[in-house]
Image (spheres, grey):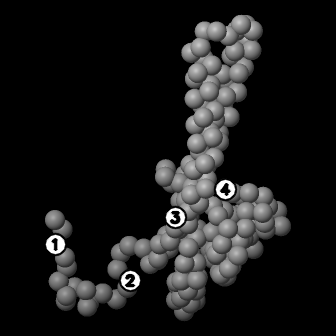
Amino acid sequence: MVPFPDVSTLLGMTGHPPGPLWTGRASNPLQWLLAVAGAACVALGVELALDNAWTSGFVPLLMAVTGCLAAGLLVLYGTVAFVHVTVTIDTEALSVRCGHVGFPRRRIELTDVASVEYLSRITPQHWGGWGYRWRPEKGTAVIVRRGEGLELRLGDGTLFTVTVDDAENAVRVIRTHLRTLAR
């Protein structure tokens, strides 16, 4: 067990204690249905590979098995990777981690952020679907569901958008930190 620091140590702190200033998540449980469909494709590919009653020859069997396994694994990874997103803001950066593995991930230094905006309604249709998205006129985004999120304008003019619950508080934390950096 780690001992808790005494009160005099806590009162003597001049900066923020170690750890995140803000952490938020967003999830989309409906994507589990797509994950089940991907798992079904993988199961079909395995069943085709193990079933000896294939009468059309080896090449069509190989193509069917490969197609089912590839499609199933792509759908399975694509949905499980974007079932949820975790956004963490600490004193140095905003970090975005997707899915259970935490990949793909993005880290944006707060010194690179020019401004931040709260967006009350972000939809996958604005970005071309769920996932890690890029659009020339809009920048980059991590979209796991429709709803609130935040948009960072970086110093080079590019935009980064992410859907996350409690985005208003995240925007407040980033703006407070940007004011501190400006001093």
How much space separates mark 4 and mark 3, taking CA atoms?
13 Å
Q: Which residue is mark 2?
A: 16
Q: Quadrant of residue 106?
A: bottom right
How much space separates mark 1 and mark 3, taking CA atoms?
29 Å
Give coordinates of residue 159: x percent, y percent.
72, 71
- Above or below, 180 against 40 in this view is below
**Residue 86's mark?**
3
Q: Is residue 77 visible?
A: no
Q: Which residue is mark 1?
A: 3
Q: Quadrant of residue 150?
A: bottom right
Q: Nearer the viewer, mark 2 or mark 3?
A: 3
Q: Nearer the viewer, mark 2 or mark 1?
A: 1
Q: Amino acid at mark 2?
A: His
Q: Earlier in the sequence, mark 4 or mark 3?
A: 3
Q: Amino acid at mark 3?
A: Thr
**Residue 60's mark?**
none
Q: Earlier in the sequence, mark 2 or mark 4?
A: 2
Q: Earlier in the sequence, mark 2 or mark 1?
A: 1
Judged from the image, the secondary structure of the residue bearing numbered disc 2 is loop
Label 4 Cα neighbours within 10 Å, binned few <14 / some 14-19 / many ≥20: many
Q: Which residue is mark 4?
A: 131
Q: Earlier in the sequence, mark 1 or mark 4?
A: 1
Name the residue furthest front.
Answer: 53
Judged from the image, the secondary structure of the residue bearing numbered disc 3 is strand
* C-beta proximity under 8 Å, tags 2 and 1: no
Q: Nearer the viewer, mark 1 or mark 3?
A: 3
